[in-house]
Amino acid sequence: MEKVLISVIVPVYNRADTIRRAINGILQQTYQNLEVIIIDDASKDFTDKVIASIDDARIRYVRNENQQGANISRNIGLGYALGRIIAFCDSADIWMADKLEKQLAQLKNENADIVFCAEKVFVKDTSYILPFATQKAFIEQGRLAEQLAIENCVDTSTLFVKRKCFEEVGKFNLELPRLQEYEWMIRAVQKCKVSYLDEVLVHAFIRDDSITSDISKLLKAVPVLYREHANFFASYQKQFDLLLSPVKQLNLKNASYDDYEKYFQLLEETVSGFYEKDAIQFYQEVARFFVEKDYIRNFIADEAQKKHTFLRLLENQEQEFYLFGAGEAARKLYSFLKGKFMEHAIKAIIVSSTKNNSKADFQVPMFEILQCDEKIKQKPVILAVSKNAVYDVVCRLRRNGFTYIICLTDQEWQIVEG
């Protein structure tokens, strides 16, 4: 079998504490025909000394004279790469030892241009798997483009790409301070064959100084992403989901009105003719978002007065109840209840449709809403869905006659997540 050269590009800035771990994870791959191109974005700590202490001829070190950002650094790395295959590893991330071997095998077996894999993301004391279960369902049905219109599910460190894709699709968009792999994948999925490898082959670490933690960069990136791909998002009727994502993040951080105003101004400045085209509908969506938020806040308060709370339910070991949802939130809640020896109390999982949901993570039956009889509708139903979905789920359950609905508060979710 021909041993193709794989170029691994590693952008780094002030990561003296993690860069050795990241590089060792690459050098110790079971597939050894590789080069490691490290682009040091003018680090001010001793990152360069750590790299210099690693004795391996496959390492190529390039230092930017001035800090330019990870996006430009990746593009610079592409200019130095000699391999027919390109992979990326962020400087705080860890690869599993067989990542490249497995992705190369899938690339050949599927005759694909791009292979991306699952990853485990660590944020402070919590972790989760990407893609989420709901995202994976879309991907496995061959609907990756539609999933990308809803939200991103691909991280740079999971990408494994034929060089020709960058020649056909172009490099990373330098105007984007964030979401660069998201924007690139939107271009790539329309021109290249993309395959998903359902194995966790990357451990990604989000720190307080990570780009992912910087909401100001998100505010700047979304208008650019919208401008570049408005037709793509509109083709799936998801353009306002994208535009609302910074609004929801600002809300989670209890931002001031000035922060929202800055985002609206960025939209006006970035998207030509935005206020003539989509602004009215966008503001209606923003208003609806806050109406929903207030509705859920009042709903939780009303249920609490009836003593319908998650913590109160835990006090009654004899109580039977149902969970709504089968995604990441449901798995976390199921695991928490199992740890409390209350697995027996969960009678079933309720979902909108069983078609896109796996039963593998739950040892209880799974019902669709329309399959539930009046007896079930009188029992407690605990919502285990993302915050963005709570309003729609509560409304749907109430329309179908469910009378005992429990939404977890932020404090209760913190208890669940440990």
Image (spheres, rainbow, N blue to C red):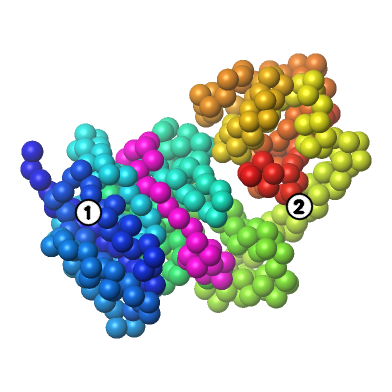
Q: In this view, does 413 lie above or below 176?
A: above
Residue 209 part of the magenta segment: yes
Q: Provide the residue span drawn in magenta.
A: 189-218
Quadrant hosting residue 377? top right
Q: Is mark 2 on a helix, strand or loop?
A: helix
Q: Eyeballing the image, is 278 above or below 408?
A: below
Q: Is residue 189 visible?
A: no
Q: In this figure, which residue is indicated by the disc labeled 1?
A: 27
Tag 1: Cα neighbours inside 10 Å, few (<14), some, or many (≥20)? some
* Up-down relation of residue 259 to residue 58 (above or below): below
Residue at image point 65% right, 58% down: 248
Secondary structure of residue under mark 1: helix
Mark 2: which amino acid? Lys
In the image, is 83 to the left or to the right of 388?
Answer: left
Residue at 38% x, 79% y is: 44
The residue positioned 50% from the left and 41% from the top of the image is: 132
Left-right relation of 368 to 63: right
Q: Give the percent coordinates (x, y) of residue 266.
A: 57, 74
The residue that mark 2 highlights is 293
Q: How many C-alpha atoms fall within 10 Å of the one at disc 2: few (<14), some, or many (≥20)?
A: some
x and y percentages locating residue 202 in the rendered image: 37, 47
Assess whether mark 1 and mark 2 are in contact (beta carbons under 8 angstroms): no
Query: Disc 1 marks which amino acid?
Result: Leu
